[in-house]
Amino acid sequence: MSSSTEPINNPPSFYEKEFPNPWMMSNWEKHSFISIVQQLKPEVAIEIGNADGGSLQVLNKLVPKVYALDLYEEVHQKLKPQFPNIEFHTGDSKQILPALLKSIKEKNEKLGLVLIDGDHTTEGVKADINIVLENYIPVTTLIILFHDSFNPECRQGIVEANWQACPYVHFIDVDYLPGTYVDDIQNGKLQKNTMWGGLSLAILQPQKREHQLQVKQTAKELYDQAFKGSFYNTLRYRLRKMFPRKQ
């Protein structure tokens, strides 16, 4: 927190001194994430998508063993000096994650938390989730969190993931925390009413479930109403999806 003599320009989270790295989560997402990690007390965690180290700084302080995955070398070069105890893996998570999960299993480590906040395309989100579901059997309670679940493309990937095929999934709520409208930059231009934020939460247990799994969307009505007035419900967006720009 700033001193009382300095202006406060942004709503305080009250964690500014403890976790000073820039953090692309809302204050309610920060509080929820910190609380989950504090209560769960995982021995091992994986974070996919590290950006400026916002949520990674929480894991570094509260989790004994952390694996950090990011596509970009420059991200890890910036973060490695700050977090020397974290094990960094640079590259495509779809290539790295299966071998990492195998290694965690072979070392008898107790994976307790996975935060997925990397590839924000539908197929990328779905692939990261499915790799965890298909390549790891939990030995303790495992929480999987997904940031930006309010974004339509991310949300579609979460909903379409193969939850039913994994017998160790006991709970999933796409809307554990809903998101909001955000003014964003699209192709170099300010775009209002884009939908970001939100946390989805899944719980995996070592024992197989005996109940019918329901993929809950507890804020679906809120999402649907937000979508109607969003950038994603415009002709511009639909045309962009139909005719993507060549890279």
Image (cartoon, rainbow, N blue to C red):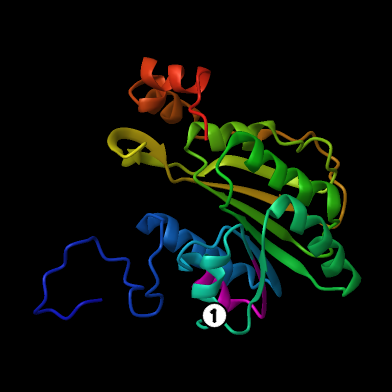
Identify the residue at image location x=50%, y=31%. Answer: 152
Identify the residue at image location x=75%, y=66%. Answer: 111
Picture quarter with the N terminus: bottom left
* Viewer can see residue 182: no
Check the image and name the residue furthest to the left. Answer: 5
* Left or right position of 54 against 203: left
* Viewer can see residue 56: yes
Q: Position of residue 158 (x, y in %)?
A: 63, 38
Of 177 and 182, which appears nearest the observer? 182
Q: Secondary structure at mark 1?
A: helix
Q: In the rendered image, which residue does mark 1 sit on?
A: 61
Identify the residue at image location x=56%, y=78%. Answer: 80
Residue type indicated by callout 1 = Lys
Q: Position of residue 153 (x, y in %)?
A: 54, 33
**Taking 145 as reference, is 237 above or below it?**
above
| Residue 67 within the segment the image draws in magenta | yes
* Left or right position of 95 against 64: right
* Left or right position of 193 against 128: left
Q: Position of residue 83 (x, y in %)?
A: 55, 81
**Taking 120 as reference, is 46 above or below it?**
below
Of 205 and 122, which appears nearest the observer? 122
Which residues lie in the magenta part?
56-68
| Residue 57 within the segment the image draws in magenta | yes
Q: Quadrant of residue 84?
A: bottom right
Identify the residue at image location x=57%, y=68%. Answer: 37
Q: Position of residue 247 (x, y in %)?
A: 52, 35
- How many marks on residues? 1
Of 67 and 143, which appears nearest the observer? 67
